[in-house]
Image: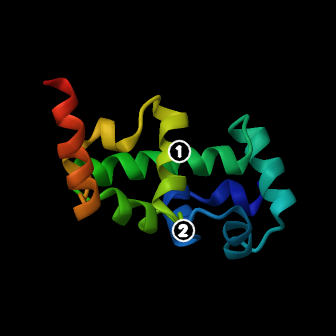
Amino acid sequence: MSRLDRVTDWSKYVRRADYCVATLARKLNVTPRQLERHFQTTQQMTPKVWIDNIRMKDAKRMLRRGASIKEVAIRIGFRYPEHFARAFERVHGMAPSQAFPKNVVLLPANVAKRQEMSHFGR
């Protein structure tokens, strides 16, 4: 049994590693390659794919609880909310602003644009 087989709360380690494969490997005192072999054997996927799945589940949970898209993006390790929105859309088939419209923070420019666009329907 390897030391990786003894890990029981992978999600906790992933969050503490800021959703980063290299950081996760370092925290577990293994190489990224050892981590990759372990995941291929036990999960039939790469650690990156598995971590991205956890990341999106965490994002969805935070959005359901009312966190803003920007806040969620930062908390799950995205530098830019736009990158998070694209990743979310790839996984869920829709942007987080469509899935959770109440979580969109409207900036003055966005408010004006939305009002302008609402006139097109009339």
Residue assigned mark 1: 86
Residue assigned mark 2: 79
Query: Callout 2 environment at 10 Å: few (<14), some (14 to 19), or many (20+)?
Result: few
The spot of residue 30 in percent (x, y) is 80, 69
> Viewed as shown, does residue 26 lie left or right of 68?
right
Task: State the residue in front, 78 or 17.
Answer: 78
SS at mark 1? helix
Q: Residue at x 47, y 28 (%)?
A: 93
Q: Is residue 61 visible?
A: yes
Instruction: Tell me if label 1 and label 2 are in contact, CB under 8 Å.
Output: no
Q: Is residue 98 above or below residue 106?
A: above
Q: Residue at x 16, y 34 (%)?
A: 119
Ranked by sequence position, the earlier of labels 1 and 2 is 2
Identity of the residue furthest to the top in this view: 122
Q: Is residue 59 above or below residue 107?
A: above
Q: Is residue 65 visible?
A: no
The spot of residue 14 in percent (x, y) is 56, 62
Q: Residue at x 44, y 61 (%)?
A: 73
Name the quadrant of the C terminus.
top left
Mark 2: which amino acid?
A: Arg
Question: Which disc, if any, is residue 51?
Answer: none
SS at mark 2? loop
The spot of residue 49 in percent (x, y) is 66, 44
Name the quadrant of the N terminus.
bottom right
Mark 1: which amino acid?
A: Arg
Residue 83: quadrant of the picture: bottom right
The CA span between labels 1 and 2 is 13 Å
Q: Is residue 9 above or below residue 54?
A: below
Task: State the residue in front, 117 or 48.
Answer: 117
> Viewed as shown, does residue 12 lie left or right of 62?
right
The spot of residue 21 in percent (x, y) is 70, 62
